[in-house]
Amino acid sequence: MITQNIVYSNAEEKPGIGNEAAGSKELPVRILNNLVTRERAVGIGLMSGGVSVVEGNIIAQTGSVGIAVNGSTVLKLNRNRITKTGAPGIVIIAGSEIHEMQQNIVTNTRGPKMRIKESKVVEK
């Protein structure tokens, strides 16, 4: 579990918090209640088939996307606050699958607030 961390001013071209190919539907990587701010690139990046739960995070002042889901599964994408990003707040692409997405707040972003392309949000 990745919880209650402050990630500030990462000078790398990598996500502040990332999941690359880790976790399963039975035991997802849980990214909860973190503050990610002044990131040069993506705030939270989920990629390469990883399985995650992403809830209650604050992402502010990123150079790119707030939360990027790229070819991954997110069981819960809830109650995140995203503001002042250099790209859309939430991007879901490349065959990603979202099982639950509720009560996210996205403000002051460049481009659309949320973008979904070639992916799906599963309805229960």
Image (cartoon, rainbow, N blue to C red):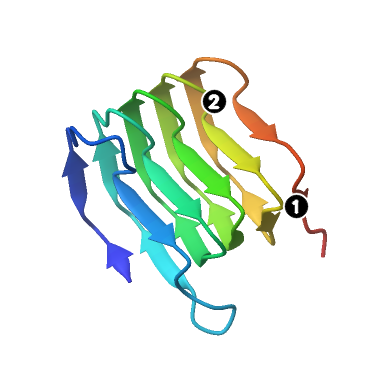
Total count of labels: 2
Element class at badge 1: strand
Residue occupying image coordinates x 29% and y 51%: 34
Disc 2 crowd rating (10 Å Cα; few below 14, some 14-19, many 20+) is many
Quarter of the image where the N terminus is located: bottom left
Q: Is residue 15 left or right of residue 26?
A: left
Q: Position of residue 67 (x, y in %)?
A: 47, 41
Q: In this orientation, which residue lies closer to the viewer: 18 or 114?
A: 18
Outermost residue on the right side: it is 123
Residue occupying image coordinates x 42% and y 19%: 86
Q: Point out the tag, 1 or 2, that comes first from the N-terminus.
A: 2
Label number found at residue 88: 2
Residue 36 in the image: above or below residue 123:
above
Task: Give the alpha-carbon distance from disc 1 to disc 2, as whole Å.
Answer: 17 Å
Q: In this orientation, which residue lies closer to the viewer: 46 or 80?
A: 46
Quarter of the image where the C terminus is located: bottom right
Residue occupying image coordinates x 54% and y 78%: 24
Amino acid under label 2?
Answer: Pro
Disc 1 crowd rating (10 Å Cα; few below 14, some 14-19, many 20+) is some
Q: Is residue 71 left or right of residue 109?
A: right
Q: Position of residue 71 (x, y in %)?
A: 61, 54
Report the residue marked by disc 1: 121
Residue 91, by quadrant, is: top right
Q: Position of residue 88 (x, y in %)?
A: 54, 25
Amino acid under label 1?
Answer: Val
Residue 22 in the image: above or below residue 94:
below
Q: Position of residue 59 (x, y in %)?
A: 36, 37
Residue occupying image coordinates x 51% and y 42%: 68
